[in-house]
Each structure stands twice: as structure tokens, then as C-alpha cells.
Amino acid sequence: MKSRAFIIFSLMGVLALCMCMGCSVLNSPEPAQINNGISPDKNTSLFNPQKSYSFDDVLLSVYSIPLDPAMGEPPLHENVHFITISGENLETNGNASTWTFVLKYKNNTKFITYNKYGQIITEWAHDYPGEEVFPDQIIAPRDLFQKNHDIIYKNIPDISNASSRLVLTGGNYSLTYGNQDHPVFLTFDAKTGALTSSNEQ
């Protein structure tokens, strides 16, 4: 139990650091970092420095990565297994300043982070617990925000001016935003976009 708790705690730390720093992670075991050459000044609109990136664009980029360098080409979609996807600093259209994808490929766990610094891939030597997420079976963040506009902006009109985080895991989206005086916690069904829980009245 102590060992499992340590691993889970470590994984949470890695995910948080991925969001903030582009994956400067734990010292032992030290994950290998791979920058695939996509940088903010690369000639592509997705990775030019900008305020936010769409989920759909970043997902397409994840699918285009040759996860096995020896093969030199992207794997089939069915061989890539997403465990959790999270976005930081959401805007009203569902875009985020940082996206982090945790996935499994050939029994290896990878953290893939996208932000203004580009794309960073971090190898993780341990298993990452959680149910598989199927991106083709969920409502996109853009549509989630549009569907639940009145709920999300009920008390905070501009989410882009508040600290916010959207996490997709299992069959749910969890959205947290606001500030210390007024935190908001909302949970939505990942397939339908329906609100399932809220701390708001």
C-alpha cells in the first residue's frame, strides 16, 4: 500500500510539473525527455507563441508523433491508449494555454505536453493508473463549453481571467476555476457534456 501510494503521489507531481514547466520531473527514476524539434518559432501556427491552443489541433499533433523512433512514423490510432488529458488556463472557446496528454504505447507511459515552448515528450518508467479515454467518443472541450455556457459563466463571466483547469479522466470532465474566495468545481459527462455535479447552487 505504501509503495502504491508513493507511485500515485509521484505521478501527480509529474503531471503538475508538466503543466507548469514543460516536464522537469522527478530525480529517481529520471524520465527521459525528448523534444521532437517542434519549437515556438517553427513555421506552424499551432506552435507559434500564442495565448492558447485548441484541443482538436493538439490531438491531431499527438497522433502524428512517431512514438517509436525506430519505426519513423506514427503508430495506428488503436495502438495509442490515452489515460488522462488535461488543460490549463482555459478560454471561453475551450482552448487552453497548456495541454498535457498521458498515454500508453507498447506498455510504456508517456507525458506529452504542448504549450508556448512547443512539444515535449517525457518517458515515465512506471504504470499510470486509470481507465482508458477514447478521444473519438467524447465531446470536445469547445463543444462542452458551448453546451454549458450558462452554467460555467453563471458567477464568473470571464473564465480566461481566472485560474482554471480541465481534466478528462475515465468518463468525466472535471473543471475547476475561480479564485481562493470563490472556487468552482464542475463535473460533466465526457460523452454527452451533461453536468453531473457542482458546488454551485
Image: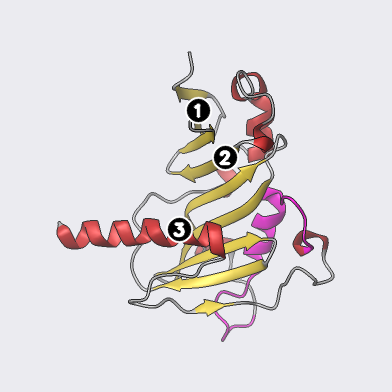
Mark 3 and mark 2 lie on one chain; the one further toward the N terminus is: 3
Mark 3 lies on residue: 15
Q: Amino acid at mark 3?
A: Leu
Whether residue 138 can be seen here? no
Colouring of the image: secondary structure
Residue situated in front as seen by the camera: 119 or 106: 119
- Classed neighbour count for the residue bearing mark 1: other residues with Cα under 10 Å, few (<14), some (14–19), many (≥20): some
User: Distance from label 3 to label 2 (Cα)?
Assistant: 15 Å
Dot 1: element: strand
Task: Name which quarter of the figure residue 160 lies in.
Answer: top right
- Determine if the magenta segment contains residue 10: no
Rendering coords of residue 60 (x, y %): 68, 58
Dot 2: element: strand
Mark 3 and mark 1 lie on one chain; the one further toward the N terminus is: 3
Query: Residue at position x 65%, y 33% from top?
Result: 159
Observer-side mark, 3 or 2, equals 2
Give the position of the N terminus as an image quadrant: bottom left
Whether residue 35 can be seen here? yes
* Part of the protein shown in magenta: 48-72
Q: Amino acid at mark 2?
A: Ser
Rendered image: mark on residue 164? 2
Query: Residue at position x 66%, y 25% from top?
Result: 147
Query: Residue at position x 23%, y 56% from top?
Result: 5
Left or right side of 77 for 11: left
Mark 1 lies on residue: 184
Task: Name which quarter of the figure residue 62 lies in.
Answer: bottom right
Q: Amino acid at mark 1?
A: Val
User: Distance from label 2 to label 1 (Cα)?
Assistant: 9 Å
Q: Magenta stretch: dominant SS?
A: loop
Query: Residue at position x 65%, y 19% from top?
Result: 150
Of all residues shown, which one is farthest toward the front?
A: 181
Left or right side of 4 for 166: right
